[in-house]
Amino acid sequence: MQITQIAIYPVKSLGGIALDTAELGPRGLEWDRRWMVVDEAGRFVTQRQLPAMARIRVRLEAAALVLEHPAAAPLSVPLAPRERPRRPVEIFRQRCPGLDEGEQAAGWLTEVLGRVSQQGLRLVRFPDDHRREVEPDHLREGERAHTGFADGYPLLVANRASLDALNAVLRDKGLDPVPMERFRPNLVIDGDEPFAEDGWESLAAEGGRYRLGVRKPCKRCQIPTVDQHSGEIPRPGEPLRTLIEMNTQPDLKGGYFGQNAILLAGEGEMLRVGDRLSAN
């Protein structure tokens, strides 16, 4: 098997960045889910509430995070550490600190996206000195892992063959196929059977440079229904409804696609498109 795609999403639920290489860290890929949009009460905001978030394009320059939207001039946020006020933020009922990126970023987001429940939007950065633990339920004995503003795990891995199988069913139903970007994975793997990832315990690079622990199937919400270019929902309920019908996780309720993973070994190693992997 090999890695065929790598992507990061510096701001949770905004546009992704396709990469050829990425550095592995304990929180996942460098710069992935480092920022998050929250409302004025500190509650996280995603495409679940605002599908139009997908329209915001994201770039990483040498010294800045740059956000772009057709309705406004680009917003530039410095990458270098600087003093920012801390504010409590909430992600899936879990509280943690966030570093507020200021009034300019808040005004820009509210201008291009509008308000949520009459509240404006703010941009927060994950503090380097904070550790947000991964839930222990699916970790092996003695394992610990932490992440940034990802839903719950540092990495999301998808299998190309699984997407092909899903799209075959969609076509049989007379529906349009969906691209992999709908599922917002960090790594796309090619070379195994459809949904074989549900049986993987770990993924190891040739030569043992790094090893990932595959720990929990990813239950999908409505975000895969959102076109990641237009920010619109072209076919309400799909492909989530079809995933549920496919019942890829017979012992679990809902639609599942992809696997959540943690870093077992290889912090600081470079992960590359074309890396050969073996699954155990």
Image (cartoon, rainbow, N blue to C red):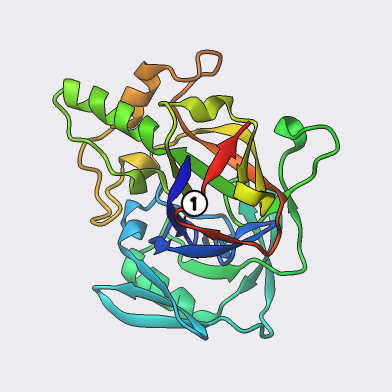
Residue 268's quadrant in the figure? Answer: bottom right
Note whether 9 is above or below 125 in the view shown: above
Q: Residue at x 22, y 36 (%)?
A: 177
Give the structural element (helix, strand or loop) at label 1. loop
Q: Amino acid at mark 1?
A: Asn
Residue 190's quadrant in the figure? Answer: top left
Note whether 176 is above or below 2 in the view shown: above
Q: Which residue is mark 1?
A: 186
Q: Residues within 10 Å of mark 1 (few under 14, many from 20)?
A: many
Residue 105 picture location, percent across and down: 47, 77
Residue 53's quadrant in the figure? Answer: bottom left
Q: Residue at x 65, y 44 (%)?
A: 212
| Residue at the extreme front of the image, as rendered | 207
Residue 275 picture location, percent across and down: 51, 52
Q: Residue at x 37, y 53 (%)?
A: 50
Residue 196 picture location, percent across and down: 49, 26
| Residue at the extreme top of the image, as rendered | 250
Q: Residue at x 37, y 32 (%)?
A: 161
Residue 132 picture location, percent across and down: 73, 54
Position of the C terminus by quadrant: top right
Note whether 6 is above or below 183 in the view shown: below
Residue closer to the observer: 268 or 55: 268
Residue 185 visible from this viewpoint? no
Residue closer to the observer: 211 or 278: 278
The tally of labels here is 1
Residue closer to the observer: 276 or 167: 276
| Residue at the extreme right of the image, as rendered | 142
- In the figure, is residue 231 to the left or right of 121? left
Residue 142 visible from this viewpoint? yes
